[in-house]
Amino acid sequence: MQRVFSGIQPSGVPTLGNYLGAIRNWVPLQEDHDCLFCVVDMHAITVWQDPKLLAQQTREMAAALLACGLDPRKCALFVQSHVRAHAQLAWIFTCVARIGWLNRMTQFKDKAGKDREAASAGLYVYPCLMAADILAYHATRVPVGEDQKQHLELANDIAQKFNHDYGVDFFPQIEPLIQGVAARVMSLRDGTRKMSKSDPSDQSRINLTDDPDTIALKIRRAKTDPLPLPEHVSGLEGRPEARNLVGILAAITDTLPENVLREHGGKGFAQFKEVLAEALIAHLSPIAAEIRRLLADPHAIDAVLHAGAERARAIADPIVARTQEIVGF
Ligand code: ADP
Ligand code: NA
């Protein structure tokens, strides 16, 4: 059985982007893969997190993952900082990675913004920790959104250089699993930026905990252009907002953008947005209700995470012990 690893930051409430680009695609993998799913709190602190809020968001993220269909009987669901293998391997990988490689990471440039000197060193070496997250389990399949592809390539470079430098064949190569038609969901306020839970504007995203009125309002206010919807996908060229909304409806109704346009091409956005909001509400309301139900019993969530960390440690500890031996520790 192939081993799968994927992680998500508890840096806010999970969004529709996280759901369509990641979480939803994790659920079927549990059936025929050895899956580890991780709430990556160590990644979250690469930018400032209020400690109380971080603890709360970590539990909320776990609740959201369970509500979306992750089943602790079929996967290991745990918190990154509970398993020390991540930190141990990350340091070794930070010493394997080259500064030149990290300098090419576009996500650092995006997240650090203009004042790069003021960004945390953690944000800069973040891909080394991500490589450790995966390789501590010798996982070979990593479901990610398209935005993480470059980091996976870097993880493969690290694995290869480690093997080469130490003359071993220890770390495997990783394959990204990029799934789904809306592999990249964009902000509702700016069709050229990805929807993100850490975006300062709440209007830019749909949260999995949003109630129906909030969803309807955010979709109604979503940025669009004045033209009607095109009849064919070629007509979405140069219209990022239209492309995004069509992609979201296609993804949430399990179809392709061309089918959405066959049905709705020629309509204005006011009408289309009503259809979209209705589809989103139908799909997301049960998830929001389940998140609320789970959060009413925080001890039960903590118990799931505790058991998940034990399973994770049983896999990672021997791999890290062997790595340390190879290095000469
Ligand atoms: P965020 O930017 O919302 O904080 P993370 O960095 O925690 O998201 O990413 C968690 C997972 O969700 C990753 O697999 C990432 O590829 C995916 N993801 C995040 N944002 C989007 C998006 N807008 N569209 C598709 N997938 C996304
Ligand atoms: Na990320």
Image (cartoon, rainbow, N blue to C red):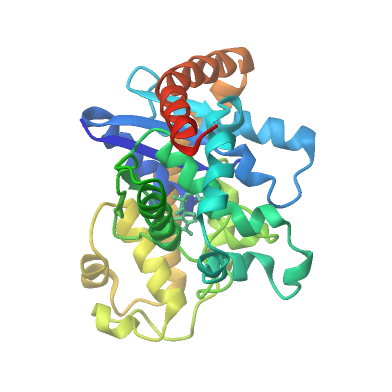
Considering only vertical position in the picture, is 134 above or below 84? below
Q: Position of residue 82 (x, y in %)?
A: 59, 25
On the image, which quarter does residue 211 sit in?
Answer: top right
Considering only vertical position in the picture, is 190 above or below 141? below
Q: Residue at x 76, y 49 (%)?
A: 48
Q: Nearer the viewer, residue 257 or 25?
A: 25
Taking the image as shown, residue 53 lies to the left or right of residue 310, namely right
Q: Residue at x 33, y 37 (%)?
A: 4
On the image, which quarter does residue 138 sit in?
Answer: top left
Q: Position of residue 182 (x, y in %)?
A: 35, 60
Q: Quadrant of the C terminus?
A: top right
Q: Nearer the viewer, residue 151 or 51?
A: 151
Q: Is residue 206 visible?
A: no
Q: Position of residue 72 (x, y in %)?
A: 40, 20
Taking the image as shown, residue 76 lies to the left or right of residue 8, namely left
Q: Position of residue 90 (x, y in %)?
A: 55, 42
Q: Nearer the viewer, residue 195 or 100?
A: 100
On the image, which quarter does residue 185 sit in?
Answer: bottom left
Q: Residue at x 34, y 85 (%)?
A: 237
Q: Residue at x 40, y 23 (%)?
A: 315
Q: Is residue 81 visible?
A: yes
Q: Please tell me how many numbered marks the rendered image carries.
A: 0
Q: Quadrant of the N terminus?
A: top left
